[in-house]
Amino acid sequence: MSDPCKKEACAIQNCLKRHGYDESKCSDLIDQLYACCQGFYLERGENARSPCCPIPSLLEFKIKQRQEEKLDAKLIQSNR
């Protein structure tokens, strides 16, 4: 069985390589992966596993965090 979110995960890796691992440049792709993962768990259940997706509880936390805090690597670096 192939991973339905592999395309999104690979797009993030390619973006990170192109932009010197600056996560803020790939934020839209990260959101796309998380949306794909949400669909994956809705379709297959919370016990399903994918190497491309965080476990459901972590996925939910990451999505909430990104929505509430507009979290990205630039913000983390600027706060140090």
Image (cartoon, rainbow, N blue to C red):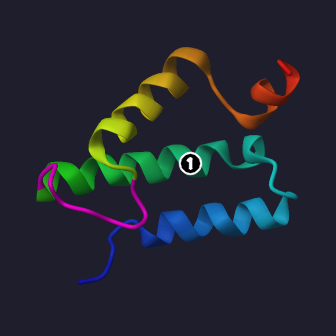
Kindly identify the residue that appears in the image at 21 percent across and 51 percent down: 41
The amino acid type of the residue labelled 1 equals Ile
Q: Furthest residue to the bottom?
A: 1
Which image quarter holds the N terminus? bottom left
Magenta stretch in the rendered image: 45-53
Residue labelled with disc 1: 30
Kindly identify the residue that appears in the image at 50 percent across and 24 percent down: 65
In the image, residue 34 sits, relative to residue 2, either above or below, namely above
Q: Furthest residue to the front?
A: 80
Q: Main secondary structure of the magenta part?
A: loop
Residue nearer the viewer, 63 or 28: 63
Which image quarter holds the C terminus? top right
Residue nearer the viewer, 57 or 22: 57
Kindly identify the residue that appears in the image at 60 percent across and 66 percent down: 11
- State the image coordinates of residue 31 (x, y, percent, origin top left): 51, 43
Image quadrant where residue 36 sits: bottom left
Magenta stretch containing residue 50, yes or no? yes
Residue nearer the viewer, 37 or 51: 51
Image quadrant where residue 27 sits: top right
Q: SS class of the residue under badge 1?
A: helix
53 left or right of 16?
A: left
In the image, residue 34 sits, relative to residue 71, either above or below, namely below
Crowd around label 1: few <14 · some 14–19 · many ≥20 (10 Å)? many
9 left or right of 70?
A: left
Magenta stretch containing residue 61, yes or no? no
**Numbered disc total:** 1
- State the image coordinates of residue 70 (x, y, percent, origin top left): 62, 22
19 left or right of 55?
A: right
Kindly identify the residue that appears in the image at 81 percent across and 32 percent down: 74
Residue nearer the viewer, 37 or 79: 79
